[in-house]
Image (cartoon, rainbow, N blue to C red):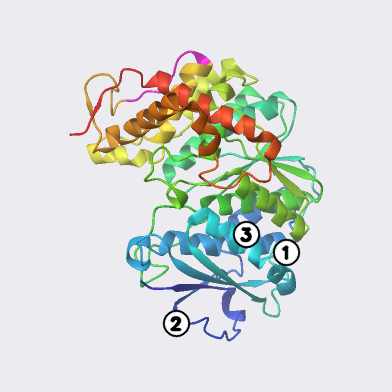
Amino acid sequence: MSAHSIVCRLGDRDRTRLQPAGPLIRTEISFIDADRRLGFGLGQALDQLTALGLRPSEVSVDLAVLAATLTAADTRVNRESEAQDRWTREITLEVPVSDPALWDSVSALIVRMLNFLTGDRWSLRFRARAAGLKRLAPAPATLALYRPRDVCLFSGGLDSYIGAIDLLHANRSPLLISHYWDTVTSAHQSLCADRLEKAYPKADFKHLRARVGFPTDAVPSSSTENSLRGRSFLFFALAALAADAVDDDVTIHVPENGLISLNVPLDPLRLGSLSTRTTHPFYMARWNELLGRLGIRATLVNRYRHQTKGRMAAGCADRALLAKTAKDTMSCSSPAKARWGGAPPQHCGHCVPCLIRRASLHTGLGSDPTTYTLVDLHARPLNALKAEGEHIRAFQLAIAQLVARPGRARFRIHQPGPLNDFPAELPDYEAVYVMGLQEVGALIKGVVVSPW
């Protein structure tokens, strides 16, 4: 086991001598490129805001830099080799900020958020930016003619696509925020945005796209990590950066169905951080607390938190458009794995997101326009010890337990994390969990999974 410290440096001006934070493996990463511009995708995001005449505060830039430093740690410090239990890493982030006193005041809150989100043990150390680095957000050359009151996360998946359609159909002019890790995700985000432009030619919406990523050798002492438990911190930070640039009260829409948002573990082996918490209600409540304390006038809202994915599809404001273009969205957790069998990237059809997607489109639209070529759920018995049957079997067990003891649903919804912030919504969370499993149950009825 090795504890790590990831130190963010802001170019050659950032020469602050730092005291060691303990017996840690220390990695310094410079975030300023040769043009004295923020690198690793942050400058890309700021340039797009500048082109719209928008300039975020330095506090929201700090938040984006913190999120990028977290991303470097989360994707470049390997769990298996660096954690004692092959999961729980110990990582310190050392970040220069515009107002160290402000950031020190929210440090404990952020640590609580990150520990909950990733299952690791985080520490934060903030210091003042070096002289000459007071302004990292470039000044726009033009006046802002576009000041949206809605920012919407736009991942290229089905949920965010429905969220964008519903906003546009209501004559809103959202700023869509996309972050992509790979060319497959990027292509689907661009394709979905193009579909919206053609469907709503008079809508005044914009699309901000960024890729915040780091070289595979960014942390030389460790191999890379692909669990990506911290990805939503970066996604939310980019949305907050854009919302803050509007300089008004803004709603950050997080379109996510309630079953995935709760993400109740399907079996006893997927407890705690082994079950992702990217949009869990507790985590989002802490984000709103953080934004308030930082003075950023934005609020994260998931209007679909009590709806299954099927209900989202059924209630989409433009079901005709959805039926025609849903195939262009990407829901699979790892579409590139199709290449192992010599096929192009596509939906695998059997991971948890794919199963929920398939069930939802049958529920909401009556059919699924997506093509799944890698596995036929009903053609033959599936192997529970392989990816093709692992998650189907987990759903079958969870559904069987719920049928045997329906009352356990009210307890199971609390397993991924606390719901103390929303006591009046507990019946709704219980209902969306039950209905979500029922939707998937209808899809996999008759599917045979054998423990071969």
The foreground one among 451 and 79 is 451
Please state the horizontal and vertical placement of residue 233, each as a whole percent of the image.
57, 53
Please state the horizontal and vertical placement of residue 309, each as a whole percent of the image.
53, 27
Residue occupied by mark 1? 58
The foreground one among 1 and 15 is 1
Tag shown at residue 280? none
Classify residue 340 by image quadrant. top left
Residue occupied by mark 2? 23
Q: What element does badge 2 sit on? A: loop
| Sooner in the amino-acid sequence: mark 1 or mark 3 | 1
Residue occupied by mark 3? 64
Magenta region includes residue 370 = yes
| Inter-mark Cα distance, 1 to 2 | 32 Å
Which kind of residue does numbered mark 1 sit on?
Answer: Glu
Q: What element does badge 3 sit on? A: helix
- Residue at 63 percent across and 35 percent down: it is 426
**Eyeballing the image, is 279 above or below 58?**
above
**Residue 18 is at least partly visible in this image:** yes
| Sooner in the amino-acid sequence: mark 3 or mark 2 | 2
Question: From the viewer's perspective, is the residue at label 1 or at label 2 nearer?
Answer: 2
- Range of the magenta residues? 365-372
**Total numbered circles:** 3
- Residue at 44 percent across and 19 percent down: it is 368
